[in-house]
Image (cartoon, helix red, strand yellow):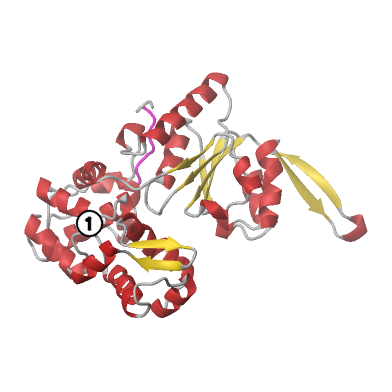
Amino acid sequence: MSSGSSIPSAGAGNMAQTGGIGSPVGNWTPAGDRMLDATLRPSVWDEYVGQSHVKNNLNILISAAKKRQAMPEHVLFYGPPGVGKTTLAHLVAASLDAPLKTTSGVALERAGDLAAILTNLEPGSILFIDEIHQLSHKIEELLYPALESGTLDIVLGKGPSARTVELALPPFMLVGATTRVAQLSSPLRSRFGGGVYQLDFYSDEDLRSIIARSATLLGLDAPSEVVEKIASRSRATPRVANSLLKRVRDYAEVHEKELSAEVCELACAMFGIDSLGLTKDDRRYLQTLQDSFKGGPAGIRALASALHEDPDTVENVYEPYLLRLAFIERSAQGRRLTTKGREYLQS
């Protein structure tokens, strides 16, 4: 991928004023703080660490489309939260020098919501729909002709006098993202001719690169041992890594200390994050599975009820990382605590 395409980093000017721990940040505001995630987001392909298979495939897709002077085919990214799906959408738009319109599946409740977005797209735009599995069947049906033939069928009137008007849409590329690809209907998945790409968890090595870059952007002098400790506690997820880095920075600033391995340990202990990145909620999940269900198997609804959580939250927030650590396993009978999970609770 060419590294020449870039996305303006919101708040970059403010971030340039940031010094080390405890230094003033000029006229920094809460709104500026909310721009931190956008500032830390890679703005060129060379800054995007990991997911090499996906990047290589996108390189071919985008380069071929540019040679044909056409829009690339629609693509879908799926994987756990925080592994870079939204960032890839931004980079695709930057590579094509195209406007990016962002929405979510849950926000598109009515046909008029989708129609308003599609008819107002600029030619050559990228439409990014996050959590696209939450689209209703009715919205999906409306989306199909838009993806295949670039048209939108609008029904005017009701009853016998109703008629369908076909509107031509400007050329656009849909980028979908989901954490639950199995919930996408087969007809919708088949419309992503540019590819359906899985994004996986990150290695500690890649996370160290991400944390070191983020520390530089935040104006922090982060020793290698601090980077290492944060990486090992980041649940194999860049979003968690950046969040934990900022929280450790805040702890050091409040206590007027330099970033060090000791300060990182103290901060993580206060946050309830152990050496594996597990939180008190993760430990509560494991302890509940052991104490209330004798290690399992436990059905998802029964387990969620015992945790006073929604089943979707348990399945999508608690379990992915615990599965990766092999502390639990899923089966047709339910969730079960593994030997590694039991050993962790006893340690």
Kindly indicate the quadrant of the structure image that contains residue 321.
Answer: bottom left
Vertical arrangement, residue 93 with respect to residue 129, above or below:
above
Q: Which residues are magenta?
A: 4-11
Disc 1 crowd, CA 10 A, few/some/many (<14, 14-19, 20+):
many
**Residue 222 horizontal/vertical position (percent):** 13, 48
Apparent side of residue 19 relative to residue 44 in the rendered image (left or right): left
Q: Residue at x 29, y 44 (%)?
A: 12
Magenta region's main secondary structure? loop
Q: Which residue is mark 1?
A: 233
**Residue 276 horizontal/vertical position (percent):** 22, 59
Apparent side of residue 217 relative to residue 97 in the rendered image (left or right): left
**Residue 66 horizontal/vertical position (percent):** 52, 23
Q: Residue at x 28, y 70 (%)?
A: 283
Kindly indicate the quadrant of the structure image that contains residue 124.
Answer: top right
**Residue 261 horizontal/vertical position (percent):** 9, 56
Q: Quadrant of the N terminus?
A: top left
Q: Would residue 104 be visible to someone looking at this image? A: no
Element at label 1: loop
Based on the picture, tell me whether residue 24 belongs to the magenta stretch: no
Q: Residue furthest top?
A: 67
Q: Nearer the viewer, residue 38 or 128?
A: 128
Based on the picture, tell me whether residue 5 belongs to the magenta stretch: yes
Q: Residue at x 47, y 54 (%)?
A: 179
Residue type (three-letter) at the residue carrying disc 1? Arg
